[in-house]
Amino acid sequence: MRLGQKIADLRKKNNLSQEGLAEKMNVSRQAVSKWESEQSIPDIEKIVNLSELFGVTTDYLLKSGEPSFEFKNEDINDKDKLPVLSDELVRKYLTASRKNAKFRALAIALIIFGLACICFTRALRYSLDTKYFLEKYGDRLTSIVSTIGYILFIITIAIAVGLFVYSIMNVREFKQLKKQNFDVREEKKKLEATTKTFHKNNDNYLVLASILAVLSIIGPIMESTSLLSGIEPLITRGISLSIFSVALYFFNFYLFQRNYLSTLIKHKKHLPIKLHRLFVYGSWIYVFCVLGIFYITTRLPYGLYIPFFNPTLFVYLSITVYCLFTYFFIKEKAE
């Protein structure tokens, strides 16, 4: 038996998760994962600490071969056993987390819907910008309509911020669950039916979010092919943003619920530190490049317009590419 297998075996016999062992050894969970998969080996100081923690010799850890002992349940003191979460606490946490998932998903959706409100009010303003209305009301009415659009946007942002802050306050009492060590195997057994029910009831949200996200691109595509004119592009943008906000709601509702459930079963994947930094820095560079291209192309003189290039459609496609890349990158590289 090699070192990585021994560490994994001793950890499981001591009812420790990878997160629990990482906390005791003052390392990251990724480091423990790499020890067990033999992608790296702990330094001599960590090997000594492991031998003291598990009550074995350093020779046993370093030498190859099968263990000459077997842990028995009675060998583990009651005080060393990890606690099991009460059913009442788990029930309260899951109820609060589902409520929180709705609040946070709605907060993100409202931000996008606020942009849709601006598009709709701008379309209304241009529709009122006719000779009849200008003669009767002047420019005052169109200015009022435009102002209403921005006010609606600010209101949606304020509601979104309020929902997000409330969601944080709503789970304050469960904050320690993320740091607390408990018997993960017991929790997985208890939550096996809950996990199956979660996927049965919520996997459809991912399908619906994907369909709506694709439908939201139809408007920009029609706009890029010059099929729309006048106020029609503004209306289609508003409709597209509205559909996209609903897609974001369903997607984030699923994602947040899954994240909360993962806290109880300690089933989370993380990128290694170097890849995490690369992903974060790369994301910021990507965002600035997309915004820079959008800004430049929307302010080009008329004679310099790029044929068949629509800045709005470019942003939609950039977001889609980023989401797909993020999903597959994390799926392949996370540990």
Image (tube, grey):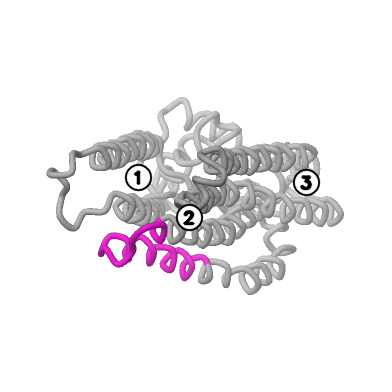
* Structural crowding at the residue carrying mark 1, measured as other residues with C-alpha within 10 Å and reported as few (<14), some (14–19) or many (≥20): few
Q: Is residue 37 magenta?
A: no
Number of marks drawn:
3
Mark 2 belongs to which amino acid? Ser
What residue lies at 74% left-to-right and 40% top-to-bottom? 166
Nearer the observer, 150 or 126: 126
Q: Earlier in the sequence, mark 3 or mark 1?
A: 1
The residue sitting at the left extreme is 303
Give the percent coordinates (x, y) of residue 220: 35, 60
For disc 1, the marked residue is 39
Mark 3 belongs to which amino acid? Pro
Residue 321 figure quarter:
bottom left
For disc 2, the marked residue is 127
Nearer the observer, 75 or 128: 128
Residue bounds of the magenta highlight: 209-233
Give the percent coordinates (x, y) of residue 171: 75, 42
Residue 233 figure quarter:
bottom left
* Structural crowding at the residue carrying mark 2, measured as other residues with C-alpha within 10 Å and reported as few (<14), some (14–19) or many (≥20): few
Residue 217 seen in the current view: yes
Give the percent coordinates (x, y) of residue 312: 33, 51
For disc 3, the marked residue is 83
What residue lies at 46% left-to-right and 49% top-to-bottom? 129
Secondary structure at numbered mark 1: loop
Q: Earlier in the sequence, mark 3 or mark 2?
A: 3
Secondary structure at numbered mark 3: loop
State how far apart marks 1 and 2 are (Cα).
65 Å
Mark 1 belongs to which amino acid? Gln
Label 1 vs label 2, nearer the camera:
2
